[in-house]
Image (spheres, grey):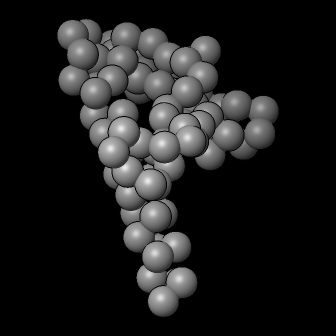
């Protein structure tokens, strides 16, 4: 029913975010987003050839190339 459809949509959107993060991490050098949270995930109206929305990772203001300094804790004012 409706609950199953909602759960399936949540999984698809989560997979979109995971694919976006995988792309960032597969760059050379890898890119660390450093602020992945729900306000930084945008939904596009439709994915090509689909009736479902598509999630896009956004807001790269804290993004940085991976290095040893990423081992430091990063706190944003919301956390």
Q: Position of residue 26 (x, y in %)?
A: 22, 23
Measuring 33% from the left and 45% from the top, which residue is drawn there?
49
Instruction: Work out whether residue 7 can be spotted.
Output: yes
Q: Considering depth in this image, is 54 or 73 the residue closer to the camera?
A: 54
Measuring 46% from the left and 76% from the top, which residue is drawn there?
5
- Quarter location, residue 25: top left
Q: Position of residue 4 (x, y in %)?
A: 45, 82
Direction right: furthest residue: 77
Left or right? Give the position of 66 relative to 38: left
Measuring 21% from the left and 10% from the top, which residue is drawn there?
28
Position above or below: 35 against 17: above
Left or right? Give the position of 1 relative to 23: right
Q: Position of residue 38 (x, y in %)?
A: 62, 46
Position above or below: 44 against 51: above
Instruction: Work out whether residue 41 can be spotted.
Output: no
Q: How many marks?
A: 0
> Which quarter of the rendering shows the C terminus?
top right
Position above or below: 54 against 6: above
Left or right? Give the position of 10 relative to 42: left
Q: Considering depth in this image, is 48 or 23 the residue closer to the camera?
A: 48
Q: Considering depth in this image, is 40 or 3 the residue closer to the camera?
A: 3
Q: Position of residue 6 (x, y in %)?
A: 52, 73
Left or right? Give the position of 62 relative to 66: right
Measuring 67% from the left and 40% from the top, which residue is drawn there?
39
């Amino acid at each position: 029913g409706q609950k199953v459809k909602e759960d399936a949509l949540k999984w698809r959107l989560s997979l979109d975010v995971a694919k976006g993060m995988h792309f960032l991490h597969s760059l050379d050098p890898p890119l660390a987003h450093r602020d992945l949270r729900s306000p930084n995930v945008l939904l596009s109206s439709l994915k090509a050839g689909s009736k479902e929305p598509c999630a896009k990772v956004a807001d790269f203001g804290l993004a940085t190339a991976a290095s040893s300094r990423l081992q430091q804790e990063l706190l944003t004012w919301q956390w």
